Image (spheres, rainbow, N blue to C red):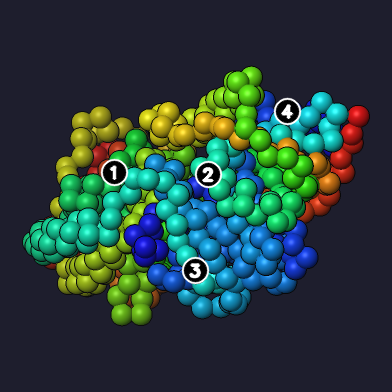
Amino acid sequence: MRREDIQRMLDDGVGLILATADGNCTPTLADAEAIEVSADSKSILVYGSSRKLGSVLRDVKSNPRIAVTIGRPSDNAAIQFKGLVQSVRGTTVLEKEKARDLSDRYRKEISLLGVLPKVVTALDLSVDTVIEVLIVDVFNQTPGERAGQSLGWETD
Amino acid sequence: MKLSQIDFCFHGVVPSKIATCSRDGIPNAAYISHIYRVDDKHVASSFQFFNKTRRNLLENPYAAIQVRDPVSLHPYLLKVKYIRSEESGPVFEQMSLKLDVIASHEGMGGIFRLRAADIYEVLEVTDLGPSFPNSHEFESQGQQQSNEDLDLIRVISDHLSRIKSLEELLDCSMGVLHRYLGWRHGILLLSDSRSQVLVTHATYGYAEAGVGSEVKYGQGLVGVCALRRRLCQIGGIREAFRYSKAMIRSTEEANASEKIPFPGLKNPASQMAAPILSQDDLLGVLMVESDAKESWDSRDQFFISVMTNLLGLGIRALNQPESSMAQGRAADVKSVVGQNWTFRYLPDEEQMFVNNAYLIRNIPAKILKYLLDVYLKTKRTEFSNLELRTVKELNLPGIKDNLEARLILLRKRLDEHQAGVRLRSTGRGKFSLEVLGALSME
C-alpha cells in the first residue's frame, strides 16, 4: 500500500479513531479530526483537539505505541496504522487550515448519509494539536474476515 | 450514569469504536457495527470473526468503547472489561436475529454467522460532551410518559373492543397504529401454516396495498419473526446494509418470483415486527417500518406487543366458524359489468388466474375454483362457510382453518382486481357470489 492509496480515502472524508494504552496496558480511545501522510510516507500527522485527546496524550508519555484507524463512513472501508508517537505539538495556522479542509470533507461525507444538517454544522472538529506518528505497519480494518491483515507499507 | 439513560446509543445506528490492547502493550482501534446493552452494567458485541480485537480481549480483557447518540452524535466513553462469551441465551438470540435478518436480505447466511455474544462489564461511563439532561429530567419525563401511555392503552383497547368482524379488525388496527401510535407504515400478515407462508391482509402507508403478497417463514424481518415467534426489530438498517456493502431490500429479493409485490418502503431506516399469537398458535405478524426513525425504543416495543396481544384475542374470537364474512366496502363495479372473464386454475401450483393475470393462490384459489365450478354448473350463487368446510377438495383442516380470513383475502383480491365476481356477506356464516359479467373456466 502506498501514500496515494490512502490519499484516495482521505479525499472522500474519513472518520478517525486513536487508541493508546497506559503502562498497565489499559487501553483508551479518542477522536481526532484529520490526518495526512508525510511526503516521505514514513509518518502520519494526526490533527485533533487537546480537549478530546486528553487521555491519549497522557498515555503516549509512558507508552508511545498508538493505533490510528481511518474509516470511510459511506462503505465502512477502514485502514489502521500502527506506529510510534514521535512528537506532540501545537498546530500552525497553515495546519489548522489544512485540517479544516479535511474535516469539511468528513462533514460532507456524513451529510450524504443522512446526518441532520444542524448536527453536522454543530460538530466541533476544531484542532489545536498535531501528533506525529512513525508508521510501523498498516492493516486492513474493513469489517470482515480480512480485517487485521497487513497491507504492507511502501515508503519513498 | 445508567446505560438505560443512553439506550438509543445501543440500537446499532451509528457504528461504535473500540480500543483494545495486547498483553505487550500494543493498542488496536476498530469500528464495531453494534454494541448491545444487556442491562445497566453490561454491554455486548458480536463475535463473528477471530480478529485482532478478539485476540486482544482474550489476552487482556480491558477495553474502551465509544458509543454515540444516533441523532445528535453525542459521544459517550465506556471503560469495560470482557468477562465471557455466550453461545446461546437471550443476548445471543437478539444478536443472532439481527444477523439473520441482514443475511436473509443479502443471501449471505454463512458470512453473517454469529459465533458468540461477547459480554463486557461496564466499569465506567463518561459523557464526552457538555450538554446532556440529568437523571432527574429523565425520571420526570418518564413519569409523564407512563401516564399518557396508560391512557393510550385504554383508548386503543376500547376502540378495538367495538369491532364486530375480522375484516374490520384487520383494517381498523392499521388505523390505530397510525392515529394513536404515529407509525406511518404498517403491514398485517396472517399465517398460513400449511404453506409456511405469511399472507398480507392489511396495509397502510404504501402506494400499493399488496394484499395477497406472501413472505415465507424465515425470510426477512417478518419471516424471521414468524419463525422465532418473538418481537424482532432492526434499527440502523441503512448502516447495516452499508456494512454488508449492499442496499438490497429483502422483500424485493424474497418476493422476486411472487405474483403480488410485497408492499414496503424501498429504503427503510428501521423495521419492527411482532408475532400475533393465540395460545400456542402463530396467527400472523404485525410489521411497522419507518424511513425517518432510525430505531425503535422500548415504548414502541411495548405498544406493538399490546397491539399484537389484542389482535391475537380479536382474530381468535372473530375467526370462529359461526362468524360472518364482513360486508366490506362496496367496490366500484361499473367498469366491470358486462365484460367477459376467463378464469384458469393451475392445480399443481394451486394458483388462479383471470384473463391471464395472476389473482390468488393456495386455499383461497381453491375456494374460488369451487365457487365458480358450482356457479357454472348450476348457476347457484348462495354459499355458506359450513358448506366449504365439507368440500373435500378444499382440504381445510378440521379446526383452526382460518376460513374467515381466507374468504376476506379472496374478497379483497377480487375487489382489488375487479375480476368480474364479488363475494358479499348474506348473514352469519353465509355469503353470495355476485357475478358481474360472462364467466368461463379453462
Label 2 marks a residue whose chain is A
* Distance CA(mark 3)–CA(mark 4): 38 Å
* Disc 4 with disc 1 on a shared chain: no
**Mark 1 vs 3, N-terminal side:** 3
Dot 4 alpha-carbon crowd within 10 angstroms: few under 14, some 14 to 19, many 20 or more: few
Report the number of numbered marks.
Answer: 4
* Disc 1 with disc 2 on a shared chain: no
* Residue drawn where x is 45% and y is 49% of the image: B128
Q: Is mark 3 on a helix, strand or loop?
A: strand
* Distance CA(mark 1)–CA(mark 2): 40 Å
Percent position (x, y) of residue B271? 41, 51
Are dots 3 and 4 in contact, CB under 8 Å? no
* Badge nearest the viewer, 1 or 3: 3
Dot 2 alpha-carbon crowd within 10 angstroms: few under 14, some 14 to 19, many 20 or more: some
* Distance CA(mark 1)–CA(mark 3): 37 Å
Q: What element carries label 4?
A: helix
Are dots 4 and 2 in contact, CB under 8 Å? no
Residue with the mark numbered 1:
B184
Identified by mark 3, the residue type is: Val
* Badge nearest the viewer, 3 or 4: 3
Residue with the mark numbered 3:
B122
* Disc 4 with disc 2 on a shared chain: yes
Residue with the mark numbered 2:
A52
Left or right: B132 with respect to A9? left
Identified by mark 4, the residue type is: Arg
* Residue drawn where x is 89% and y is 36% of the image: A154
Identified by mark 1, the residue type is: Arg
Label 4 marks a residue whose chain is A
